Amino acid sequence: MKILLKGGTVVSGDEASLKDVLVEDEIIIGVGCDLSDENAKIVDVSGKFLFPGFIDAHTHFDLEAAGTITADDFNTGSRAALLGGTTTVIDFATQYRGESLNHAFAHWMNKAKDKASCDYGFHMAISDWNPGVAEEITDMLEMGVSSFKLYMTYDDMMVSDKQIYEVLKRLKELGGIAGVHCENSGLIKALVAEQKKLGNSGAACHPISRPAEVEAEAISRLCRIAELAEAPIIIVHLSSKLGYEEVLRARARGQKVYLETCTQYLLLDDERYKLPYPEGFKYIIAPPLRKKDDQSCLWEALAEGEIQTLSTDHCSFTLKQKLASEKDFSLVPGGMPGVQDRGVLVYSYGVKENKISLTQMCKLLSENPAKLYGAFPQKGSISEGADADIVVFDPEERGVISVKTQAYNMDYAPFEGFETCGRVNDVYLRGNKVVEDGRVIAEHGGRFLKRGGFNL
Ligand SMILES: [Zn+2]
């Protein structure tokens, strides 16, 4: 079957221009001015932006953490993703200690199978590094898992500096890349203990126990380890100006350091932790929300192209789950939802407020994650031969983010009340219309995405 999308503005990382898009089955077979095909069904998209399907390279669906499981699994999470124009997520398969990487991969494939409504890939989170696991890296690359995740904090996940160095050397040798959660575990423990000693346990303690220095120290250490390993590195969910400055230092030494930030670090700040109980607990995430100054720094870095990807770190827990810890901030499962809201928020508060351009938005949400994670130009591009993942975005519509209209399995919305410009009207996933007029019309059509080496 052929579809011809006529009259829209096709957005790429370089330009936004009026072009028609011809799709046959799952693939884009033509992009150009005044295309015609007598066998194609014509779809009028005049006045709309056509983005390559957004990629969210940082989601956690169906993850066990802090004694509970995230509210969204691949079923609800991927539906919400589609409604926000995200046609591909790269989630985190997690190797628990004692497990092989192959076991972890099979475990996560099973979680997504028959449930995912958008395409999905996995980063492999390594928590147990040993010679057998080092051998298994080859298997992962062969199966299309070309990126890995390391944690510098969380007792059950964290790896030592020695292990980080060894993993990076191995990935350098084989052509994979690692993204790292940068926070200094020891410092967090000491600062949490200080708060407890003072008798403090509210949400306001959260940013005090994980200040920007905690992130900056870990980033600086990671960059030095990567320098010695002569390996490129990705820093995930960068939140602070202090952390950013460490990256600039490493880049000035000639290192390849890629950066990701997330919507919440751009739009929410640490004043939220001062809200009366239980409000502040909703915003407990790691790293924590920062200050207005940090937000401006991150927006500028996005505009200058110094931050490559903008993800969500979607990791949702209901308020009930958040509050199960008897008002102790240090036991609250960290994370918040976001996969549905990213496109409209970035358009409303980035593009419309002239902080970034439309083409930069496309780079951050589609093109760069596809390149960095080895899926370009199959994903992240409206071009001949690419998967027909297309977002039909109406720039004129207005809305308000609300728990009442979101698709998450959630009882609150961190961005509640945020006014938005633009709306994801229709979404095509490999040529299939999966969202129509803001409603999901085709479910469970997601497919595992095999990825190659990074190329950014
Ligand atoms: Zn995460």
Image (cartoon, helix red, strand yellow):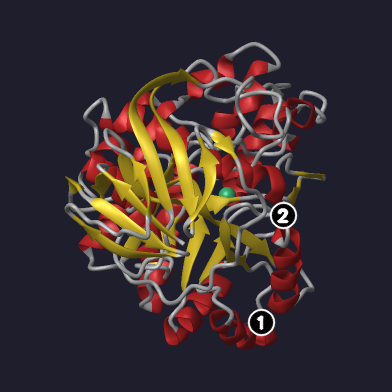
Tell me the quarter of the picture where residue 284 sits.
Answer: top right
Residue 37, above or below 284 = below
Q: Which mark is residue 115?
A: 2
Q: Nearer the viewer, residue 435 or 251?
A: 435
Q: Amino acid at mark 1?
A: Val
Residue placed under numbered mark 1 in the picture: 133
Question: Residue 356: image x %, image y %?
Answer: 24, 37
First along the sequence among labels 2 and 1: 2
- Disc 2 residue: CB within 8 Å of ligand 1: no
Residue 96 shows in this picture? no
- Judged from this view, the residue extending furthest toward the top is 276
Q: Nearer the viewer, residue 134 or 1?
A: 1
Question: Residue 174: image x %, image y %?
Answer: 46, 86
Q: For the image shown, how many numbered marks are present on the structure?
A: 2
Question: Residue 101: image x %, image y %?
Answer: 69, 76
Q: Quadrant of the C terminus?
A: bottom left
Question: Residue at (69%, 14%) from the top-left corner?
Answer: 277
Q: Amino acid at mark 2?
A: Lys
Q: In what element is the residue under mark 2?
A: loop
- Seen in the image, is 333 located left or right of residue 40? right
- Disc 1 residue: CB within 8 Å of ligand 1: no
Question: Residue at (47%, 54%) from the top-left corner?
Answer: 218
